[in-house]
């Protein structure tokens, strides 16, 4: 695969050329926008359709604003399961076949079914970007997560990563685990209630790639040596049982190194207390902000302008 993939469906697909080029470009956009500048409109008069069958705040807004910053036109439906022909029983494949005939350049798809993005990519001329497929993957989130780690810690290898919460149904940590498994010396500490443990496919992948991992139900003993703490919410909509959250509070975060970072894909419910926000380790809002810069770079890569 080149540094310009056509579709983005899962995070095992990326190669190092793509990641390096993507992060260079995202850094450029971050610097320009944070300094109050306007990036070059490299995608003028290209068209993006954002097709969301599941709720979203960050992913949808950051993709749509990224597209508009680069000069694209954006058409969106934020509640496709109710307001598109899916409500009448149309299959995803048929919907994509039809939307594709209106010649969009990119379709950003969030869907409740695992594998939906791959099914869409099979029938689409436009680039399909997987914005979350059920309990499957969320590869563009993993890219912005890895970018945040590189940006804050200056490296993506040799890290102790404590990942907590609903690891079974949380698609963001699944995608990020695949990405972090590429780098030597990373070690995972998976913290979750028994019913929400990391699934076998990821554990097998880590074993195959000789990445060490530990599973436990309490984070306390792992936090002082952590470099990255990645917390997630209970995925109630995917059947995970409520009321078992492992709560990350101020006391726990204060036991971490000052240089460590606390990440969360958001939305947070009550698994990170709000008094953590003022601590230097709290990185989740900055992480969400990076979504704009990384998604600008993603659009430029899939459309081949960098
Ligand atoms: C996540 C998702 O949709 O998977 N949100 C996001 O895109 N940042 C995480 C979640 O909903 O828990």
Image: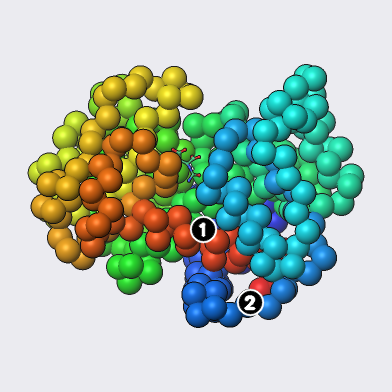
Q: Quadrant of residue 241?
A: top left
Asked whether residue 13 appears in the rendered view, the answer is: no
Residue 291's disc is 1
Residue 256 visible in the current orientation? yes
Q: Is mark 1 within 8 Å of ligand 1?
A: yes
Q: Residue, x 33% and y 67% (percent of image)?
A: 152
User: Residue 206 or 224: which is nearer the viewer?
Assistant: 224
**With respect to residue 179, does 148 lie above or below?**
below
Question: x%, y% of residue 19?
Answer: 51, 65
Q: Which percent across, then down, holds residue 222?
A: 14, 46
- Report the residue at 10% width, 44% height from top: 221
Residue 182's place in the image compared with 135, above or below, is below
Given residues 27 and 127, the one toward you in this image is 27
Q: Which of the labelled discs sits on residue 39, or is there none?
A: 2
- The answer to which image quadrant residue 247 occupies is top left
Q: Residues within 10 Å of mark 1 (few under 14, many from 20)?
A: many
Percent position of residue 13, x then y: 55, 52
Residue at the limit of the structure toward the right, as seen here: 101
Instruction: Locate the C terminus by quadrant.
Output: bottom right
Q: Is mark 2 within 8 Å of ligand 1?
A: no
- Total labels drawn: 2
Q: Is residue 116 left or right of residue 159?
A: right
Residue 137: which disc? none
Measured along the vertical axis of the image, is residue 99 above or below residue 192?
A: below
Residue 32 position, x and y percent, is 54, 79
Q: Secondary structure at mark 2?
A: loop
Name the N-terminal-most of marks 1 and 2. Answer: 2
């Amino acid at each position: 695969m080149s540094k310009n993939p056509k579709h983005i469906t899962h995070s095992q697909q990326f190669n190092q050329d793509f990641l390096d080029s993507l992060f260079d470009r995202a850094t450029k956009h971050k610097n320009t926008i944070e300094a109050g500048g306007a990036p070059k409109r490299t995608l003028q008069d290209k068209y993006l359709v954002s097709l969301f069958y599941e709720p979203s705040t960050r992913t949808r807004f950051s993709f749509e604003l990224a597209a508009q910053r680069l000069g694209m036109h954006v058409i969106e439906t934020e509640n496709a399961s109710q307001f598109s022909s899916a409500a009448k029983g149309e299959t995803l494949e048929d919907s994509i076949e039809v939307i594709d005939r209106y010649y969009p350049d990119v379709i950003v798809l969030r869907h409740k079914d695992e594998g939906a993005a791959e099914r869409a990519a099979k029938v689409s001329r436009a680039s399909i970007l997987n914005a979350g497929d059920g309990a499957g993957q969320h590869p563009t989130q993993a890219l912005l997560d890895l970018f945040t780690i590189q940006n804050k810690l200056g490296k993506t290898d040799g890290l102790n990563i404590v990942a907590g919460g609903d690891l079974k149904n949380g698609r963001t940590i699944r995608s990020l685990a695949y990405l972090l498994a590429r780098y030597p010396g990373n070690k995972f500490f998976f913290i979750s209630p028994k019913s929400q443990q990391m699934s076998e496919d990821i554990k097998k992948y880590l074993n195959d790639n000789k990445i060490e991992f530990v599973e436990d139900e309490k984070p306390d003993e792992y936090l002082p040596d952590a470099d990255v703490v990645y917390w997630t919410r209970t995925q109630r909509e995917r059947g995970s049982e409520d009321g078992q959250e492992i709560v990350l509070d101020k006391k726990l975060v204060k036991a971490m190194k000052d240089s460590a970072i606390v990440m969360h894909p958001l939305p947070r419910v009550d698994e990170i207390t709000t008094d953590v926000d003022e601590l230097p380790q709290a990185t989740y809002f900055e992480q969400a902000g990076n979504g704009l810069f990384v998604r600008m770079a993603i659009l430029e890569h899939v459309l081949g302008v960098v």
